[in-house]
Amino acid sequence: MWQPFPGNQHRLIGWFAYLGTKRLKREVRRVTFYSIQRHRLSNMSELAKTVTGFLAVIYYWIESIVLFFVPVRLKAKDISGELVLVTGAGNGLGRSTALKFAEKGCNVVLWDINTKGNEETAAMLREKGAKAYPYEVDVTISEAVYSAAAKVKQDAGIVTIVVNNAGIVAGKSILDLEEKSIRKVFDVNVLAHFWVIKAFLPDMLEKDRGHLVTISSLAGLGGSPKLTDYCASKFAACGLMDALQIELHADGRKNIHTTVICPFFINTGMFNGATTRIFSNLNPDFVAEEIVTSVMCNKSLVLIPRFFHALYQLKVLMPARSFLALHDATGGTDSMTKFTGRNSKKVQ
Ligand SMILES: NC(=O)c1ccc[n+]([C@@H]2O[C@H](COP(=O)([O-])OP(=O)(O)OC[C@H]3O[C@@H](n4cnc5c(N)ncnc54)[C@H](O)[C@@H]3O)[C@@H](O)[C@H]2O)c1
């Protein structure tokens, strides 16, 4: 029988193991040496900070596992009486989210370019007994955002929860996308979030209380065909919120929370025709309920439906070609083949 190391295999394996261990020891020594240099662990207070930091990592990990099993009603914060701003509230997910916040006893400021839709949402909220403040605002125009924010403060008071929801999609292959259309997608899906956050964060800092929510998408965590511009803008929205969360943490702002929502396709009309073989599209009411619950539980990243959290972890662990094969198997590769969208909402 053929043997890789005839006769001497034990000695050779031992030799490789010895070399491997030696290399490993050398690497560990090198990394430790650089860490000591870079992080000045020899300084006792820096060392204490590092050790308590690592202990906190373990503590919060255990806390999140325990909280997973605690019922929502026991861990959710009370948001009744809060003033919530929802952008893109004149239709779809924005409308459903505004209604869910109203059901929790919040008053809601509604921003949209679609005045008629926005007024309809306001009427629905008032029917539920909530105060509704509809405004026609194009969130891509920074000056319009700042002056509308000042008016909101005068008319309704200080906004404590902001939901950056307005979004658009073009649904074309990269070579069919016009430059103007790409810029517009970025203007609405990510740059507008900067203007809105800059308008409302100062009051939250002043009160040392608030919650910033961004509706991104699963397309903000993984690619999809015919969505290069949309995915890039939604990845950017996730990046903005990730960095902002750390910035607020570094500033010691424990009472200003951030939440990023990444849903699968929702039946609002925006992604008409888009679907996959395995997963069915979501109902906007269900997504809105998840958004409000996530805010009440101070969750920072929420994938809807939740089992996509597992796929998201797999993406990091799987080889790229396996992940592409997974797209083929689930129908993700063809998800946009029959996309028509809602023509009036398509980028001109
Ligand atoms: N529909 C989906 O399948 C899906 C999936 C994942 C994420 N999302 C995201 O959810 C959010 C809501 O999507 P939807 O499905 O409810 O879309 P929608 O088209 O039904 O509603 C979007 C609303 O935003 C408004 N809007 C657009 N541009 C605006 C601007 N410049 N200023 C102010 N308002 C503006 C529109 O008038 C509309 O009322 C978007 O950010 C979208 O990217 C949607």
Image: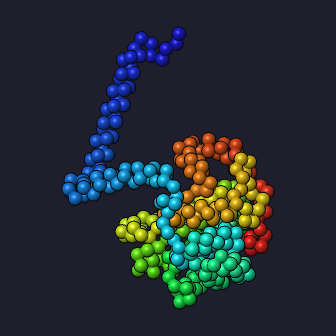
Q: Position of residue 163 (x, y in %)?
A: 57, 71
Q: Residue at x 40, y 14 (%)?
A: 8
Work out whether residue 218 or residue 9 is closer to the camera in this orientation and state it: 218
In the image, is 243 to the left or to the right of 59? Answer: right
Q: Position of residue 111 (x, y in %)?
A: 63, 79
Quarter of the image where ligand 1 sits: bottom right
Whether residue 127 can be seen here: yes
- Which residue sits at x=78%, y=70%? 343
Q: Quadrant of residue 193?
A: bottom right
Q: Where's residue 340, x and y in %?
A: 79, 63
Location of residue 123 with respect to 309 vertically, above or below? below
Q: Is residue 312 visible?
A: no
| Position of 11 relative to 72 (above/below) | above
In the image, residue 269 lies at what x, y percent? 75, 65
Task: Using the rendered view, name the quadrant where residue 220 is placed.
Answer: bottom right
Between residues 189 and 166, which one lies in front from this camera angle?
Answer: 166
Q: Residue at x 68, y 63 (%)?
A: 284
Q: Quadrant of residue 328?
A: top right
